[in-house]
Amino acid sequence: MTSLPAQKQTRNSTAAWRAADTAHHLHPFTDFRGLAEEGGSRIITKANGVWLEDSEGERILDGMAGLWCVNAGYGRERLAKAAYDQMLELPFYNTFFKTATPTSIELAEKLAALTPAGLDKVFFASSGSEANDTIARIVRRYWKLAGKPARVNIISRVNGYHGSTMASASLGGMKPMHDLDGLPLPGFHHVRQPYWYGEGAGLTPEDFGKAAAKAIEDKILELGPDTVAAFIGEPVQGAGGVIVPPASYWPEVQRICKQYGILLIADEVICGFGRTGQWFGSDTFDIEPDLMTLAKGITSGYLPLSAVMVGKRVADVLWEKGGEFAHGFTYSGHPVACAVALENIAILEEEKLVERVREEVGPYLQERLATLADHPLVGEVRGVGLLGAVELVADKASHARFKPEGRAGTICRDYCFKGNLVSRAVRDTMVISPPLIITKAEIDELVVRLRRAIDLTAKDLGVS
Ligand code: PXG
């Protein structure tokens, strides 16, 4: 038996991993010093199905599908094999200089068939952020070519999330991200979100949905309709706290965009690939977008890949009048990532996972989560498909939060994690987004663990 070098052997311990992580690794959206002072990271070493395993051998139920992305679940040999085979066949070639690769072509064709009618052209990138940067450039390019160069403004929502690059964070409406370095960039504007539970006091969901949509029209009129290029929104805001808009919202948004000739962009990075019980959130909410952002579930997170779906209205202009589109990434259409995406989509189709979310596990998760509504700490339970949210409040009647905002959520998230459940806290909302393969028994277990964490949180907060 060959023995590993001494250093390798000692590395294989939680303490050693943590020390090296603390010494060298800057984590995203993390207070670097705070994490170190808390003792460092939990080291995730393996996963299978909906279960993670950490370096201490603990099994953790992954209620977040990684980061809203591992739709097909962990441990899929078919995806590993697709990557392996493609790496041997052709690990990389670019799509820049009059070249293409079979898997990038096949995936483009497949995405055109899967997405709503008219979205027939695809531009590839590697992350949701890159895809949204690409969209910002495409829409401005489109209007310039269409003879309306003044149409540069893009409207999005407060508390929307579209990524972490300068342009995609500008599209997003996350204040702490803007505060980091003076965003948004010029030309990015934000309007209120369709968050009835938090902001709809005194209005029915129906009326509030219309009022939230009207905020877009008001912004268009304030900026001047001839200066507005596009509106972008997630069908359901994910990172913002699983904000499911009232039924009146999207039809009204669609109408307003049509009325003022503005491009409508659906950011499907979380909602896409079955999460809401249809292939895309646009199918669930009857949205007819001109452009669509895809990422995450496109490969079930096994490799980084994103795509911009471009509808006929925009594609025709870029095609006919555009000349060179001076934009692209080394890994646009990466052949291995595309091979994995194709195999992943084949799994979703063959195992009917989207139908499963719509007809079986989606309704079951919603039903089970709804049982938490009787808890003294729970203000609202909402969701669609395999997206769920549980709002923690100090006062159910007034929807008032515990002070400071976010404290209850953080406590609860930490109890979830200690209790071997991953649920993310968005301020004081616990969010859930498990792999689409989750079973009913695992959903039961998820809800038991979540209730236990909420009970412990209540105790800490002095609520009986
Ligand atoms: N659009 C949406 C709707 C997203 O949710 C992005 C774009 C950006 O994708 P990339 O691949 O560039 O990260 C996202 C990403 C969280 C969390 O904590 C959510 C995301 C990313 C990281 C953390 O909820 N969503």
Image: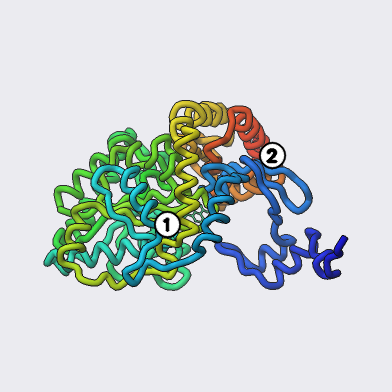
Q: Vertically, is 448 above or below 48?
A: above
Disc 1 marks a residue whose amino acid type is Ser
Q: Are marks 1 and 2 in contact (CB under 8 Å)?
A: no
Q: Quadrant of residue 306?
A: bottom left
In the displayed structure image, the side of residue 443 where residue 12 appears, left or right: right
Secondary-structure class at tag 2:
helix
Instruction: Select label 1 or label 2 by which is in front.
Output: 1
Disc 1 CB within 8 Å of nearest ligand 1 atom: yes
Residue 326, x across and y down, in percent: 29, 73
Which residue lies most toward the left here?
Answer: 147
Observer-nearest of 139 and 32: 139
Q: How many marks?
A: 2
Residue 139, x across and y down, in percent: 25, 62
In the displayed structure image, the side of residue 37 where residue 212 appears, left or right: left
Residue 421, x across and y down, in percent: 65, 42
At 15% from the left and 63% from the top, the residue drawn is 320
- Residue 427 seen anywhere in this rendered image of the structure: no
Q: Vertically, is 329 above or below 79?
A: below
How is this picture coloured?
rainbow
The residue where tag 2 is placed is 456
Observer-nearest of 448 and 94: 94
**Rendered image: mark on residue 306:** 1
- Residue 268 seen anywhere in this rendered image of the structure: yes
Disc 2 CB within 8 Å of nearest ligand 1 atom: no
Q: Earlier in the sequence, mark 1 or mark 2?
A: 1
Q: Quadrant of residue 223?
A: bottom left
